[in-house]
Amino acid sequence: GPQLLREGVMKEVPVENCLRNYLPNETKYQYQCAVGTAETSCSGDSGSPNFIKIKNNFYILGIVSHGLQWSCISTFPVVFTKVLYFLKWIKEYVNDLPEPLST
């Protein structure tokens, strides 16, 4: 795929409706769903961040997790794994990682 970083605006949709189609046996609390307003996630975007901008600060909400066979159609929902749901785990393990080697 292209190596160009892209961005787009997405709108949150009810997670229950989204999970019914993608992950019917999963809990709704660890996921959020959104549809693109003009752009969307496609194949190869798994792990990409979903941010919210509040004033002039960006906060990560989720990580791209699932889509409808990665159709790249903006009206189809994308499933994001909520970062906040896993924040305790992230803080427990990420804080103990060694600093990256300088180049």
Image (tube, rainbow, N blue to C red):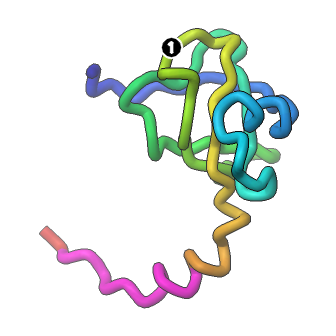
Image side of residue 72 versus residue 27, left or right: left
Camera-side residue of 85 and 24: 24
Image side of residue 27 versus residue 5, left or right: right
Other-residue count near label 1 (Cα within 10 Å), few / some / many at <14 / 14–19 / ≥20: few
Position of residue 9 measured from the top left corner of the image (x, y, whole percent): 68, 24
- In the image, residue 8 above or below residue 31: above
Position of residue 42 measured from the top left corner of the image (x, y, whole percent): 46, 22
Q: Which of the image's four quarters has the N terminus?
A: top left
Residue that mark 1 sits on: 71
Q: Does the magenta segment cover residue 100? A: yes
* Mark 1, secondary structure of its residue: loop
Amino acid type at mark 1: Ser
- In the image, residue 74 above or below residue 91: above
Residue found at x 65% / y 33%: 22
Residue found at x 60% / y 23%: 8
Magenta stretch: give its range.
91-101
Q: Does the magenta segment cover residue 66? A: no
Residue found at x 43% / y 33%: 45
Image side of residue 84 versus residue 7, left or right: right
Q: Which of the image's four quarters has the C terminus?
A: bottom left
Tally the numbered discs.
1
Asked where in the image residue 100 lies, by quadrant, the reply is bottom left
Position of residue 49 measured from the top left corner of the image (x, y, whole percent): 55, 44
- In the image, residue 92 above or below residue 77: below
Image side of residue 20 versus residue 8, left or right: right
Residue found at x 72% / y 65%: 85
Camera-side residue of 5 and 22: 22
Position of residue 55 measured from the top left corner of the image (x, y, whole percent): 81, 45
**What secondary structure do most residues of the magenta stretch adopt?**
loop
